[in-house]
Image (spheres, rainbow, N blue to C red):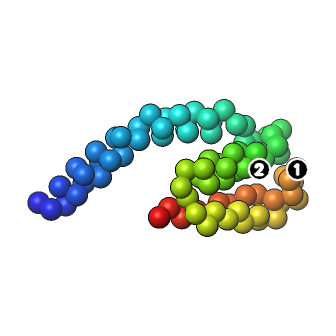
């Protein structure tokens, strides 16, 4: 079936990036992103790191939408939009 071949091709491509994906996940997990109500500083630092990573790795039109949040030290909750071409 064509869908099986397509899936296999996609799975092989993803597997090529396994080490990079694990590294990125470890780096993201190392940055705390706890809610201020739980004693944390929110998500701004993690979002900053991710935006920098996205831009350095071929993503274009990276935009941070700052949803107002008066409880967060940054005053907002970051939402990231990015396109890969």
Residue 55: image tag: none
Left or right: 72 in relation to 22: right
Q: Is residue 78 visible?
A: yes
Q: How many marks?
A: 2
- Give the vertical position of 39 relative to 43 (above or below): above
Helix or strand or loop: what does disc 2 sit on?
Answer: helix
Left or right of residue 24: residue 71: right
Q: Residue under circle 1?
A: 73
Looking at the rendered structure, the secondary structure element under dot 1 is loop
In this view of the protein, which residue sits in the foreground, 67 or 85? 85
Between 66 and 72, the residue placed more toward the observer is: 66
Q: Mark yes or no: residue 81 visible.
A: no
Disc with the residue nearer the chain's start (1 vs 2): 2
Rendered view: 5 above or below 14 = below
- Which residue occupies 82% across, 43% down? 41
| Quadrant of res 39 | top right
Q: Are marks 1 and 2 in contact (CB under 8 Å)?
A: yes
Where does residue 79 sit, x and y in percent of width and height? 68, 60
- Between circles 1 and 2, the one closer to the viewer is 2
Q: Position of residue 33 (x, y in %)?
A: 72, 42
Residue placed most toward the observer, 9 or 41:
9
19 or 4: which is nearer to us?
A: 19
Which residue occupies 50% across, 61% down? 84
Task: Work out which residue is located at the far left of the displayed protein and give it.
Answer: 1
Counting from the top left corner in percent of width and height, residue 37 is at 82, 45
* Residue 67 percent across, percent down from the top left: 76, 65
Q: Which residue is mark 2?
A: 44
For label 2, the crowd category at 10 Å Cα-Cα, with few meaning under 14, some 14 to 19 and many 20 or more, is many
Quarter holding the N terminus?
bottom left
| Mark 1–mark 2 distance (CA, rounded to whole Å) | 9 Å
Identify the residue at image location x=28%, y=45%.
12
Residue 11 left/right relative to 71: left
């Amino acid at each position: 079936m064509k869908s099986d071949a397509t899936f296999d091709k996609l799975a092989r491509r993803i597997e090529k990036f396994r080490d990079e994906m694990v590294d990125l996940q470890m780096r993201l997990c190392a940055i705390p992103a706890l809610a201020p109500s739980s004693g944390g500083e929110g998500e701004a630092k993690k979002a900053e790191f991710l935006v920098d990573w996205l831009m350095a790795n071929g993503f274009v039109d990276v935009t941070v939408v700052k949803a107002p949040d008066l409880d967060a030290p940054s005053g907002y909750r970051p939402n990231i939009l990015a396109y890969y071409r």
